[in-house]
Image (cartoon, helix red, strand yellow):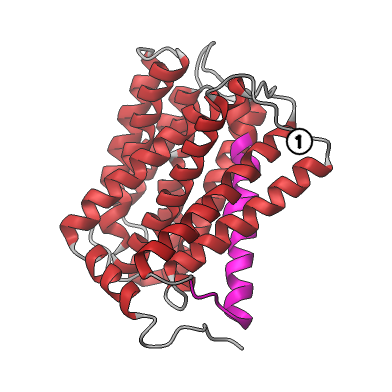
Amino acid sequence: MGHTSDTPAQQAAPSRIDAFFAVPAVAVVMAILCNAMWGSAFPFIKMGYRLFAIDAADTPSILCFAGVRFMLGAVLVWLFGLLLERRPLPMPRGRDLAACCALGLWQTSTQYFFYYNAVALLTGALGGILNSTQSFMGVILAHFLYGKADRMTLPKALGCVLGFGGVLVVTLGDGAGGSPAGIACMLLASLVFASSGPWNKAVTRRVNSFSVTCLNLGVGGLVLAVLGFAMGGSLHPQSMGAVPVLLILALISAVGYVLWALLMKNNPVSRISVFGLVIPVVNVLLSAVLNGEPLFKWNYLAALALVCAGIVLVNRAPKRSE
């Protein structure tokens, strides 16, 4: 009961995919692409709220929007897996199935409950910079999870100080673009994401990466949608662009989660985590382009510089283990 339904023949296609993602140059390109997609999610969600006329205080409809997005993402992952492996995805059983569902409840339901509420309360630039704290939280958690193999060093500590310093800078002054509740929600979402990384890595070592991602998004999205609709939420497109934006977000979640699962499975974390600096940069730029938010604000630019410097610094020292 604690094993998957995969046979050696079934694992052939994923093994070729794993080998492809283990190539260092490929990992770098895919990590940049993955983080750029995630960086674009925040401004597209803000646009989606506007196109569906979802108010910042309408938590039930916010949860409906998130849940539908991730369930659509799960369908896209299943289709991607079907095309690549030329057969339906192998589904895990027993303890592995339970682990995948639990991961969905944590990484998708819990993380995005906080994340989507934060989006409604923050500007894109502030939200993106706050969300980058997941890189520093991951370094801190690794110290306690892996002990001597990935302990905190002076460069890492200095990088974390710079990163969290960037968060302090961006929240200074009037017009920073957020409420205390929104800031708290985004920091909690980042903490959940950072803590789910090692869990995701452990599960994908036993179960097909596409299957893990499909269950992660599907179960997590279903819980969010059921909760939202049960609380009285609804979705009412206000223009022709509403549904395409929701589909773009579903594609971002599907491709982003699959890429991240494959990258985490087949590479040292230190090889790919540094590219998290792409997220706040893309977020700030697209928030200005898509939603008309200010770009050249001193606290945004200073915070971006500090956060990017911190991410680079915490990833300079080689890490021995995963």
Question: Residue 68 at x, y = what percent?
Answer: 63, 43
Label 1 residue SS: helix
Question: Residue 225 at x, y = what percent?
Answer: 71, 46
| Position of residue 24 in the picture relative to residue 127 (left or right) | left
Q: How many marks?
A: 1
Figure quadrant of the N terminus: bottom right
Q: Main secondary structure of the magenta part?
A: helix
| Position of residue 59 in the picture relative to residue 218 (left or right) | right
Snapshot quadrant of residue 64: top right
Judge whether 310 appears above or below 6 on screen: above
Q: Amino acid at mark 1?
A: Pro
Does 11 lie within the magenta span?
no
Figure quadrant of the C terminus: bottom left
| Mark 1 lies on residue | 60
Question: Looking at this view, is 206 or 80 the one in front?
Answer: 80
Question: Residue 157 at x, y = what percent?
Answer: 36, 48
Question: Looking at this view, is 137 or 37 the one in front?
Answer: 37
Q: Residue at x 22, y 49 (%)?
A: 29
Question: Residue 296 at x, y = what percent?
Answer: 35, 12
Q: Mark 1 packing: few (<14 Cα in 10 Å), some, or many (20+)?
A: many
Is residue 266 visible in this depiction of the protein? Answer: yes
The magenta region covers 89-116
Is residue 199 visible in this depiction of the protein? Answer: no
Judge whether 228 appears above or below 206 on screen: above
Judge whether 176 appears above or below 187 on screen: above
Q: Residue at x 43, y 67 (%)?
A: 209
Question: Which residue, as the protein is rendered here, is positioned at the far left?
Answer: 25
Q: Residue at x 41, y 49 (%)?
A: 256
